[in-house]
Image (cartoon, coloured by chain):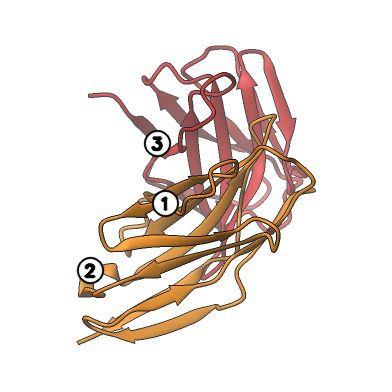
Chain colours: A orange, B red
Amino acid sequence: AQTVTQSQPEMSVQEAETVTLSCTYDTSENNYYLFWYKQPPSRQMILVIRQEAYKQQNATENRFSVNFQKAAKSFSLKISDSQLGDTAMYFCASLYAGNMLTFGGGTRLMVKP
Amino acid sequence: DGGITQSPKYLFRKEGQNVTLSCEQNLNHDAMYWYRQDPGQGLRLIYYSQIVNDFQKGDIAEGYSVSREKKESFPLTVTSAQKNPTAFYLCASRPGQGVVYTEAFFGQGTRLTVV
């Protein structure tokens, strides 16, 4: 079974500062895709960023960027200039051949004013 | 508007009764998923379907059943065999095979409470 592990159940950051959320995954596949999703209090799942495993360049979306270390099977999310609206649960997810989409246990992020 | 609709938003059932959660999508997606989320926890995969008339068990399929008779619909039945069914249930879809670099789109969820 594929596994995704988020080792930080909760984190906090001051507004305007930078925070990094960790994610590791376990796979024997060579081609796969990784995602970070955000779940605000409304509980609606929102895609933050995606990364293709065969691409060495780290994905970036505005204030959000990833550090993808394929050999270490690590996929961390960096949020720069944190905003109050970034307060949410963040989930790391992996997608492999066969369409199985697996999520980690989540990290609850609190942005403090 | 295209999207995924889960209904109802809140559902109450008596212990021992089966209950079916609805999930409909008009995105023309092949793959559909059901997840369970307990308070403060991650999403655990119950079942997923890659194509009509096909589905696979996820990590916690016991006590649940699904069907995929139509591309746009993937209902989940929570049976009386599920020992602790109270949870938040999320349905998702994505294009599926051949269009791999796409994320899953989610419905707004159904909160099931068994009393």
Q: Residue at x 54, y 78 (%)?
A: A9
Instruction: Name the spot of residue B95 as percent of width and height, x first.
Output: 49, 23
Instruction: Name the spot of residue A35 as percent of width and height, x first.
Output: 49, 50
- Determine the chain carrying the residue at label 2: A
Instruction: Name the spot of residue B97 as percent of width and height, x first.
Output: 59, 21
Q: Residue at x 61, y 17 (%)?
A: B51
Mark closer to the chain start, 1 or 2: 1
- Determine the chain carrying the residue at label 1: A
Local crowd at mark 3 within 10 Å, few (<14), some, or many (≥20)?
Answer: some
Q: Is residue B104 left or right of residue B60?
A: left
The residue that disc 1 covers is A59
Query: Up-down: is B31 above or below A62?
Result: above
Query: Up-down: is A61 above or below A78?
Result: above
The residue that disc 2 covers is A85
Q: Secondary structure at mark 3?
A: strand
Q: Residue at x 36, y 68 (%)?
A: A88
Q: Is residue A90 left or right of residue A2?
A: left
| Amino acid type indicated by mark 2 | Gly
Camera-side residue: A40 or B80?
A40
Local crowd at mark 2 within 10 Å, few (<14), some, or many (≥20)?
Answer: few
Camera-side residue: B104 or B70?
B104
The residue that disc 3 covers is B7
Asked if disc 3 and disc 1 are in contact, CB closer than 8 Å, the reply is: no
Local crowd at mark 1 within 10 Å, few (<14), some, or many (≥20)?
Answer: some
